[in-house]
Image (tube, rainbow, N blue to C red):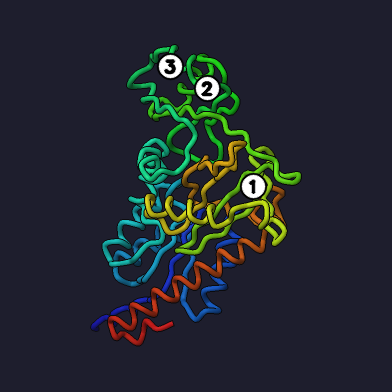
């Protein structure tokens, strides 16, 4: 008896995640895509192997894919490779993510654009050059920040360092990585807030908010804040970072220093922490998450509609 070929499950968007606290954001984005007339499919550790096999066999296809898992779990990279081989397009392509998430690499590129960056010294990996000239550190502006070139969430970062010993000890924690020694930036105080900001870039849309570097507490900008902050300048800066990083969705930390300069502190944060403030003290304000979800949904709907027009494939129309 002749077997009947399986029908291919076609999805406009695939959403991959592996962090339990990402569930609220992924579910919100999933619902938003459905309300916009797009089909989406969520992939987690529970169905990763099966989904990878289905894509490989041509039983499941995705037009677009948002990967919020492979930075922490390399098992998701196999799915990325299979998707790419089948023509799926990515938000935050992995190759661009790898380059942009290396602070030492992107520092040089951003410096060439003329953006204001902290005075920075880049040290080679400890395993390559365990010894460094102490005079280099002794002459550096104090206090300073010591951070590994890769990684996020503050892991491996030492704030308020002042001594050569601080650098030597911190470098041994990630022996295979370059380290950045960065001038500490003290922001202005605007009203009762430290002039420290997180600016999101979402497929061409920018959203700026307050972010306290000490408490990690976010706050929405109000119309009253417009007289205190040069929001167009924040937007200009994050667009330059986006052009250099070639990423679709990330955030940047920017501080207004006491000389009136908007200084880019942490260049590219991705995947962005999307825990809602309604559930987590240091989470992102819910209104901002809704704006981010709307921007992602609008971008994907436009891209998919444009592809349908170009190819004349009515099945792709949202």
Q: Secondary structure at mark 1?
A: strand
- Residue located beneath label 1 in the image: 211
Q: Residue 141: which numbered mark, if any?
A: 2
Q: Is 293 situated above or below 3? A: above
Q: Secondary structure at mark 2?
A: loop
Q: Residue furthest right?
A: 192
Q: Residue furthest left?
A: 2
Instruction: Give the class, few, some or many, for how many residues have Cα within 10 Å of label 1's Cα (few <14, many ≥20).
Output: many
Q: Are marks 2 and 1 in contact (CB under 8 Å)?
A: no
Q: Nearer the viewer, mark 2 or mark 1?
A: 2
Residue 22: image x %, image y %?
A: 57, 56
Q: Nearer the viewer, mark 2 or mark 3?
A: 2
Q: Residue at x 51, y 48 (%)?
A: 252
Spatial distance from mark 2 to mark 1, Cα to Cα? 25 Å
Q: Is 311 situated above or below 59? A: below
Mark 1 or 3, nearer chain start:
3
Residue 182: image x %, image y %?
A: 49, 29
Q: Residue 136: which numbered mark, if any?
A: 3
Q: Nearer the viewer, residue 154 or 21?
A: 154
Q: Secondary structure at mark 3?
A: helix
Instruction: Give the class, few, some or many, for how many residues have Cα within 10 Å of label 3's Cα (few <14, many ≥20).
Output: few
Q: Residue at x 23, y 83 (%)?
A: 2
Spatial distance from mark 2 to mark 3, Cα to Cα? 10 Å
Q: Is 173 situated above or below 288? A: above
């Amino acid at each position: 008896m002749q077997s009947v070929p399986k029908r291919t499950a076609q999805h406009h968007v695939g959403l991959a995640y592996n962090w339990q606290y990402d569930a609220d954001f992924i579910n919100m984005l999933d619902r938003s895509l459905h309300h916009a007339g797009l089909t989406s499919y969520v992939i987690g550790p529970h169905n990763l192997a099966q989904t990878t096999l289905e894509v490989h066999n041509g039983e499941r296809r995705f037009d677009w894919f948002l990967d919020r898992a492979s930075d922490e779990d390399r098992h998701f990279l196999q799915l990325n490779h299979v998707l790419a081989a089948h023509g799926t397009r990515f938000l935050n392509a992995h190759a661009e993510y790898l380059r942009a998430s290396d602070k030492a690499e992107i520092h040089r590129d951003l410096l060439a654009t003329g953006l204001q960056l902290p005075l920075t010294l880049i040290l080679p990996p400890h395993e390559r050059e365990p010894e460094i000239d102490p005079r280099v550190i002794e002459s550096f502006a104090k206090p300073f920040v010591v951070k590994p070139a890769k990684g996020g969430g503050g892991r491996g970062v030492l704030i308020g360092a002042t001594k050569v010993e601080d650098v030597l000890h911190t470098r041994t924690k990630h022996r295979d990585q370059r380290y950045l020694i960065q001038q500490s930036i003290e922001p202005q105080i605007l009203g009762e807030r430290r002039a420290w900001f997180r600016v999101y870039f979402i497929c061409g849309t920018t959203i700026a908010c307050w972010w306290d570097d000490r408490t990690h507490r976010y706050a929405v900008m109000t119309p009253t804040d417009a007289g205190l902050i040069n929001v167009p300048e924040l937007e200009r800066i994050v667009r330059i970072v986006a052009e250099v990083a070639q990423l679709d969705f990330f955030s940047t930390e920017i501080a207004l220093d006491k000389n009136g300069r908007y200084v880019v502190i942490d260049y590219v944060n991705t995947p962005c922490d999307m825990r809602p403030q309604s559930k987590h003290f240091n989470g992102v304000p819910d209104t901002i998450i809704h704006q981010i979800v709307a921007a992602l949904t609008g971008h994907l709907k436009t891209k998919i509609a444009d592809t349908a027009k170009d190819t004349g494939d009515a099945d792709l129309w949202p």
